[in-house]
Amino acid sequence: MDIFLSAIFAGTSRGAIYALAALGLVLVWRGAGVVNFAQMGQAMFSTYIASTLIAQNYSYWIAFVVALISGGALGALVDLLVMRPLNRKRSSSVLDSPAMRSTVPVIASLGILGVLQAAAGMIWAAEERGFPTPVNSLGLVINGKIMPFTAFDLFVIGIVFVTLVATTYFFKGTGMGLAMRASALNPEVARLSGIRIGFVRTLSWVISGVASSLAGLLVTPSANLSPNTLDLILIIGFTAAVVGGLDSLLGSVIGGFVLGLLVAFVNVYDAPEDIFLAILVVLLTVLIIRPQGILGSKEVRRV
Amino acid sequence: MLEIKDLVTEYGSVKALNGISLSAHEGKITTVIGANGAGKSTLLRTISALEHPSSGSISWKNKSIVGLSPEKIVRLGIAHVPEGHAVISQLSVEENIEMGALFRMRSNKADVRIAIQEIYQLFPRLEERKKQLAGSLSGGERQMLAISRALVSRPSLLLLDEPSLGLAPLVVEQIIQTVNDLCRNTGLTVLLVEQNANTALGVADHGILLSLGTVVADLPAAQMKADVALRAAYLGY
Amino acid sequence: MSKAHSYGRTNLIISILFAAVVFFLSIKFDPYNQGQLAVALMVFIGVLSIVLLTGTSGQISLGQGALMAVGGFAAALGILNLGLSIWLAIALAIIAALLAGLLLGIAAARLSGPYLAGTTLVIALAIPSLATRFESVFGGDVGLNIAFGDPPAWLTSLMSEVGYEQWQLLATLPFATLALFFTSNILSSRTGRTWRALRDHEIAASLAGIKISETKIFVFVISSGFAGLAGVLYGLRGIVGPSVYPISLSLLLLAGAVLGGIRSILGALIGSILVVFLPDLIEWASGSFSPSEQIANYLPAMISSILLILTVVLNPGGIAHGLHHKKRHH
């Protein structure tokens, strides 16, 4: 029973991280129409920055905040330096085909991933970094009994919960959130309303960058950081977003938790090597049975 | 006053606007009529900068607005209600109206609230449905909503593109009358593009007839309405 | 002579010329570069699979490296467990890859854009993980050993001396030439036109009676065959294992295709040579700078990634497209 419970808790706290990664993907998909495969590369890079600060004896929280800021900044840079010029390019015959038009940003984001991984290698020699936790990562002890989850698990779930509440409030309750939703749904009407959709689009990239940095920071205490560590998170985050619905923020979060539990159970009851296969099975099942995902809308698929 | 001189807008090699010149006087309703494909929508889209002209000039209150971005044009007091999908169905009525006022929120929050109140007085049906999704509204209500979104920015020039499209005659009457009252009471300048020439010329001060991208007639509305030959030649009735 | 026949003849002449040029270079190059050229030819075959799949029919796949692995492992199992000769093993590799391509196509043919990219990426990671999962069969992380072996007697008597790398190159050459020939025939045939219609005007194509799903799956199958061939040749250099076919291999193929020109055979050739010789080029160019080892290690990846971004933003058609353009404007 204990094993089952610890799988549930591990799955939930991992799921929280996947939810963040999926959230980041959906934000950029809705705000900019791009699936950003470089996302976890950005997270990796900003986590390396954080770990460097920690190695120089700055406090966890300062490193944390700097990582988030650099994640946001990286997101903005990606939009301004690569995605905007890409959008402006109209006059190539290669881009005349709709299939290629949706493929080209994917290739661009893979290039960005490559740059970030190579840069991390150059700056930090791809050395594996440990990353501390701000709270105890051993089994939590309550009233003398050892719980199947740790204080860190609670910390992670708590942070993701706060993030969810904050993003929901942002989108439903603020003017900028409304501007972002409007720009994603109907850019022309948004422009005619005076909304600066370029700025809004870059903001999506910034917020997504912050969310994915958060995911990177929270996952690395339990996984050593190297330029390729977070690739797995990207795959799972992508699958989570597809499962939940690529245009639904809530859906992506649900998808994240679903996959977190799946991964935990496969880990505990089967073998870690089967994780990729399990993810693949889930991905294919969703794409075949309900391609728009749990909460996605039918029009999502016109890529 | 809106002044347009020799405006040319091209789609590839097709000249949608082929040297258009017209004026819309302040506080008056100027209507642009003509058959499908005459270039009426393109005209409005060029003024609001959704399309770029290849040559010609547009000036509003004596300042040129060619080359500005749509967002900038809205801030100059020009609001465009495009034809067709002018509201966002997945947002609520309230949010659609708010959307039009977002750019003013920081500088003029109090006035925005007043403007929204005034709009609800103008279109009480919208206030009743303010929490509903725009997609669940009837055609007429959606048109009212689209106009509301433009009005909440307190424009001095309103560009209206075929408000009657797909609406029942009674509803069209209602909407056109509301626009007319608005113009007479607040001095709003209106450039009204319409296929329904009769109704449009009924409220307008001035009429401009477009055909295949050029101005064919530029007359006081009453005169244009009475010109049977013109109507037969270009409007088919 | 019908148009098809005249194209076929042109393609044959080009293929023979290609083989002749490479053969000539094989004699002139030193062993290291012979080995590099061999790898470039293997990559060329893999990049051709992308030219067919992505450049011609518009379907993006990040999993071509995994299909190479399927070919490599099939051949390895054939040689080690079934005692097959290298030629039979290569045939087995292609068949296995065709089957894998069929499965992949069935799974992926209804997808497009980022959905297709993401799914093929997951597949690309799932397949190698099978190798570690079934360690006893696939050799786990260490992998299985196969090799080109010694050059045949008739060749050594013909050419007096054939070095190890030279043999690799000469053994790979006929396959690369065949791949070139097949691809050029496909591209200039009605099949190629159908695939291009899929890419450019899917709706119109389906209205014209083209069976979209079936054609898409067919393209996957054919392109997988190419990838499998590339994979077995790649593995014959010495090892077949997960470390030989990492995800970066798929990305390398994609980069080669995009940089060279994703729609043309010439682009595939330019791109393959570029990505394979890039580390050598960089080392040669940075000779006077002598960067630290840390930087030097990652410089090829950095430069090819930057080139990839620049290509996609500034010249999506790749180098081949740029050359074609320049020719037109003279």
Image: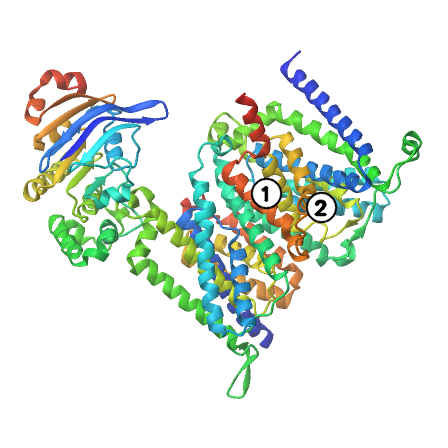
Image quadrant of residue A170?
Answer: bottom left
Residue at mark 2: C70
**Residue C61 has which mark?**
1
- Total marks drawn? 2
- Residue A46 image offset from top left, x and y in percent: 51, 61
Q: Amino acid at mark 2?
A: Val
Q: In the depicted view, which residue is nearer to us: A303 or C272?
A: C272
- Residue A79 image offset from top left, x and y in percent: 44, 49
- Residue C74 image offset from top left, x and y in percent: 76, 45
**Mark 1 or 2, nearer chain start:** 1
Mark 1 belongs to chain: C
Q: In the depicted view, which residue is nearer to us: A142 or A295?
A: A142
Q: Is residue B157 left or right of residue A217?
A: left
Q: Amino acid at mark 1?
A: Ser
Image quadrant of residue C94?
Answer: top right
Q: Whole-Å distance between the Cαs marked 1 and 2?
A: 15 Å
Q: Nearer the viewer, mark 1 or mark 2?
A: 1
Q: Give the position of the C terminus of chain C as an image quadrant.
A: top right
Would residue A202 be visible to someone looking at this image?
A: yes
Crowdedness of circle 1 by 10 Å Cα count: few (<14), some, many (20+)?
Answer: many
Mark 2 belongs to chain: C
User: Is label 1 in a helix, a strand or a loop?
Assistant: loop
Q: Is residue B75 left or right of residue A268?
A: left
